[in-house]
Image (cartoon, rainbow, N blue to C red):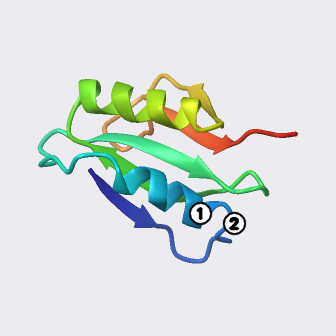
Amino acid sequence: MKTTLLEGKFVPRFDHDLLQQLAAVPVAPVSEAVKIGVENEYGQIYRIIETADLLANKELLSKLRQSGYFVVPLNPIDEYSVLAIVKLQEE
């Protein structure tokens, strides 16, 4: 797994908690990366998470759902697209 902040985007307060959740995910080589976008409270994707494959992606998304994050699955159109968008659950 690899994570990247996008330049010029607002980093929300929940990012620290998100990084703690990601720290518990085993590190795997990213050969055929599957990308997940993380959305801030302004609706901007500010962070990209890359997992090694679809199985690692499924496990990560399941863990984030259990931790209270909302996951919006997408149909990627090319290798640069994200497979899902993760955002904080609205209260």
Q: Is residue 24 above or below residue 71?
A: below
- Name the side, left or right, on which 1 lies relative to 42: left
- The residue singled out by tag 1 in the image is 15
Count of labels in the image? 2
Q: Quadrant of residue 33?
A: top left
Mark 2 nearby-residue class (10 Å; few <14, some 14–19, many ≥20): few
Amino acid type at image mark 1: Asp
Marks 2 and 1 close (CB-CB < 8 Å): yes
Query: In the picture, which quadrant includes the C terminus?
Result: top right
Residue 15 in the image: x percent, y percent?
59, 63
Residue 12: give its label: 2
Q: What residue is rendered at 74% in x and 51% in y? A: 43
Residue 73 in the image: x percent, y percent?
54, 24
Secondary element at tag 2: loop
Residue at the extreme right of the image, as rendered: 91
In-front residue for pair 55/26: 26
- Name the side, left or right, on which 47 lies relative to 15: left
Mark 1 nearby-residue class (10 Å; few <14, some 14–19, many ≥20): some
Q: Is residue 11 above or below residue 67?
A: below
Q: What residue is rendered at 56% in x and 66% in y? A: 16
Secondary element at tag 1: helix
Residue 65 in the image: x percent, y percent?
57, 30
- Name the side, left or right, on which 50 lies relative to 69: left
